[in-house]
């Protein structure tokens, strides 16, 4: 068995992990599993794609940076896309989730997110059709790095980006007042309110972080695989599995869970075959639920 | 005559949907268990019954040529066991975990249906599933009407049984658990045990509906059991009003009428190359409809979900929180 699966697994794992951060934050702070999270990914990716083509139309062809397959337009577009996805999440919260949350039935919110997911995805399919598209059709030469592993410059760049983002979110959660407020709210909502934490602003920050990271994960999929309206929905099960494996509410847990699932998927593709890939996260999910339902870094429910 | 035949065909499909919705109503409406993978359970029923009743086929496992009734029974047993296992794994945990797990079940069932060629025929599905009154296929009207009769009888039996169940002591325990779990447990009722039972029975009913559908069309393929099916049934239950069996049946017929009607409309209004896009818009519209109903009329047409005092207090606190926030 070639060691190539390590690189593939780390990449898939980064995508899953970045998405799972949003899932785990919504789950621990807003207390519902958001089935529309995958579609935030897809919307963010299509928004980024739209901005890339808009820039392309305005300034013409831009040379890619060094050995990478993309130039500065993609980086600018990614920033715009992240802002767009964050706004989309905030908007959806305002018109839908916040109102249902105030009715006090958590599971109704889950169902609404399921309906919203269907609507969002179908709107993408309506606007862009279900045909896959790409950021770039250029083929990159993978460089050998020893042990039979090959890696492309894009892949290195995206792995570095993931590491930077995860570190940033981790520092935000542990070193800033906002982050501590978020942790307080997830651990004990009533007490957090009593000590004067601004719940509304914590909720906003949660959506902004979740939405922006979902967009990055989506764009990673777009660069390395392809862009489809279903790209986010297909990531939903791995993201949930990663969030639960890592322990709900834990950012390092979500990322580690994502990497474990990514590596397991890549290993399964080599050993069993690509068609069974999607079953891997289900098996891991079931194993976690039976053996250790609070996950690797989870805390017991209060 | 054509219209009558189409009417019978339409009603048959709608009633099969309402059978699934009845199963979901037992799980969600009565017990408060959230199943987002019901397409998986419907598929399990359809494939089980198809495997048991089709004539022997060299290309795949089985084809046992058993009578149709055995197929239906087998579908209910396998569907019930699958649901019971899912329930046992997750019902001691938070309700969201059940949602995520059922979602996973649907994904895995879809994978098996697509990839386990030996068992399910893969993407090409299974054909030649025996149809009740298959001998009448020469006269489509008679055939459609007799199918409608069969499906109506099965739905009616399921409906009456569920009505009876929900009034029985068993049903009252489920309602008690839904309304106030702590009080019910303090009376010595095992929450998990009752919930697993309700989830299993609901799963068996869904599987039966899948089997009925398979024998009605005579052909099944993985594409019949995509997440869109789950979504349709949920809309049916929410429109009808969760908690009410009558609501489940009427909601199914109503939503299926809207669905089929808007489908016909788009096929008339849009040129063939735009059909796929129009279908996507149709799904988006129904998704928005679900959210709107949840917002303005969460009880649907016939829902009996009472506002509980325990929740209204909490709701006030939460409402205060969100109004100060926005």
Image: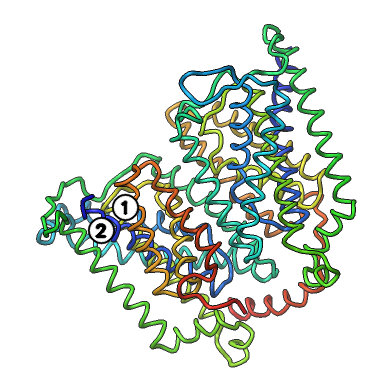
- Above or below: residue A300 compared with residue A233: below
Pointers 2 and 1 within a single chain: yes
Query: x, y percentage for residue A60?
Result: 16, 52
Give the secondary structure at mark 2: helix
Quadrant of the frame with the N terminus of chain B = top right
Q: Is residue A39 visible?
A: no
Residue at numbered disc 1: A266
The quadrant in which residue B157 appears is top right
The quadrant in which residue B75 appears is top right
Query: x, y percentage for residue B103?
Result: 55, 51
Q: Is residue A229 left or right of residue A55?
A: right
N-terminal of the pair, mark 2 or mark 1, is 2
Give the secondary structure at mark 1: helix
- In this rendering, the count of numbered labels is 2
Q: Is residue B42 visible?
A: yes
Q: Determine contact: label 2, label 1, CB under 8 Å.
A: yes
Q: Which chain letter matches label 1?
A: A
Residue at position x 21%, y 54% in the image? A4
For the residues labelled 2 and 1, the Cα–Cα distance comes to 7 Å
Q: Is residue B251 left or right of residue B283?
A: right
Query: x, y percentage for residue A192?
Result: 58, 87
Residue at position x 85%, y 54% in the image? B170
Of residues A122 and A302, the one nearer the viewer is A302
Q: Which chain letter matches label 2?
A: A
Of residues A256 and A290, the one nearer the viewer is A290
Residue farthest to the bottom, as pictured? A195
Quadrant of the frame with the C terminus of chain B = bottom right
Residue at numbered disc 2: A6
Q: Is residue A74 left or right of residue A242?
A: left
Mark 1 Cα shell of 10 Å, populated few (<14), some (14-19), many (≥20): many
Query: x, y percentage for residue A41?
Result: 40, 58
The quadrant in which residue B40 appears is top right
């Amino acid at each position: 068995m070639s060691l190539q699966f390590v690189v593939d697994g780390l990449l898939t794992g980064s995508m899953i992990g970045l998405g799972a951060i949003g899932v785990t934050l919504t789950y621990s702070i807003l207390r519902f599993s958001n089935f529309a999270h995958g579609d935030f990914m897809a919307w963010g990716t299509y928004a980024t794609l739209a901005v890339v083509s808009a820039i392309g139309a305005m300034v013409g062809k831009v040379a890619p940076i060094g050995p990478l397959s993309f130039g500065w337009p993609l980086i600018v577009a990614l920033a715009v896309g992240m802002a767009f996805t964050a706004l989309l999440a905030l908007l959806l919260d305002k018109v839908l989730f916040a109102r249902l949350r105030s009715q006090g039935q958590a599971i109704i919110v889950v169902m609404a997110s399921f309906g919203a997911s269907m609507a969002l995805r179908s709107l993408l399919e309506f606007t862009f059709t279900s045909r896959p598209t790409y950021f770039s059709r250029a083929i990159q030469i993978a460089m050998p790095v020893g042990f039979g592993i090959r890696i492309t410059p894009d892949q290195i760049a995206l792995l570095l980006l993931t590491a930077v983002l995860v570190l940033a979110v981790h520092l935000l959660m542990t070193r800033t007042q906002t982050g501590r407020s978020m942790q307080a709210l997830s651990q004990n909502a009533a007490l957090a309110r009593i000590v004067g934490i601004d719940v509304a602003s914590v909720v906003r920050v949660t959506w902004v972080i979740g939405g922006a990271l979902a967009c990055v994960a989506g764009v990673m999929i777009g660069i390395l695989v392809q862009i489809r309206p279903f790209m986010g929905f297909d990531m939903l099960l791995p993201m949930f599995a990663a969030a639960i494996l890592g322990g709900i509410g834990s950012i390092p847990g979500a990322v580690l869970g994502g990497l474990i699932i990514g590596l397991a998927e890549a290993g399964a593709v080599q050993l069993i075959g690509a068609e069974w890939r999607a079953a891997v996260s289900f098996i891991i999910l079931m194993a976690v639920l039976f053996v250790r339902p609070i996950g690797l870094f989870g805390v017991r429910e209060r | 005559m054509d219209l009558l035949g189409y009417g019978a065909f339409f009603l048959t499909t709608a009633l099969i949907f309402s059978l699934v919705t009845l199963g979901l109503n037992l799980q969600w409406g009565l017990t408060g268990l959230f199943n987002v993978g019901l397409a998986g359970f419907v598929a399990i029923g359809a494939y089980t019954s198809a495997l048991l009743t089709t004539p022997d086929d060299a290309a795949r496992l089985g084809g046992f040529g058993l009578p149709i009734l055995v197929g239906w029974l087998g579908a209910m047993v396998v569907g019930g066991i699958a649901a019971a296992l899912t329930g046992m794994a997750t019902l001691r945990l938070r309700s969201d975990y059940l949602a995520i797990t059922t979602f996973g079940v649907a994904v895995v069932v879809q994978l098996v249906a697509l990839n386990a060629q030996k068992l399910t025929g893969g993407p090409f599905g299974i054909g030649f599933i025996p149809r009740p009154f298959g001998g009448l296929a020469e006269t489509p009207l008679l055939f459609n009407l007799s199918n409608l009769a069969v499906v109506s009888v099965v739905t009616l039996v399921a409906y009456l049984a569920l009505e009876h169940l929900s009034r029985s002591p068993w049903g009252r325990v489920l309602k008690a658990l839904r309304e106030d779990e702590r009080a019910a447990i303090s009376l010595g009722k095992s929450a998990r045990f009752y919930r697993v039972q309700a989830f299993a029975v609901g799963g068996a009913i869904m599987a039966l509906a899948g089997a009925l559908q398979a024998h009605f069309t005579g052909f099944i393929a993985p594409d019949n059991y995509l997440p869109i099916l789950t979504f349709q049934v949920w809309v049916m239950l929410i429109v009808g009003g969760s908690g009410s069996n009558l609501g489940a049946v009427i909601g199914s017929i109503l939503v299926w009428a809207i669905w089929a009607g808007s489908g016909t409309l788009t096929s008339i209004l849009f040129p063939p190359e735009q059909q796929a896009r129009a279908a996507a818009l149709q799904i988006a519209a129904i998704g928005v409809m679900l959210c709107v109903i949840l917002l303005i009329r969460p009880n649907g047409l016939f829902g009996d979900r009472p506002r509980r005092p325990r929740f209204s207090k909490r709701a006030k606190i939460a409402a205060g929180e969100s109004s100060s926030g926005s």
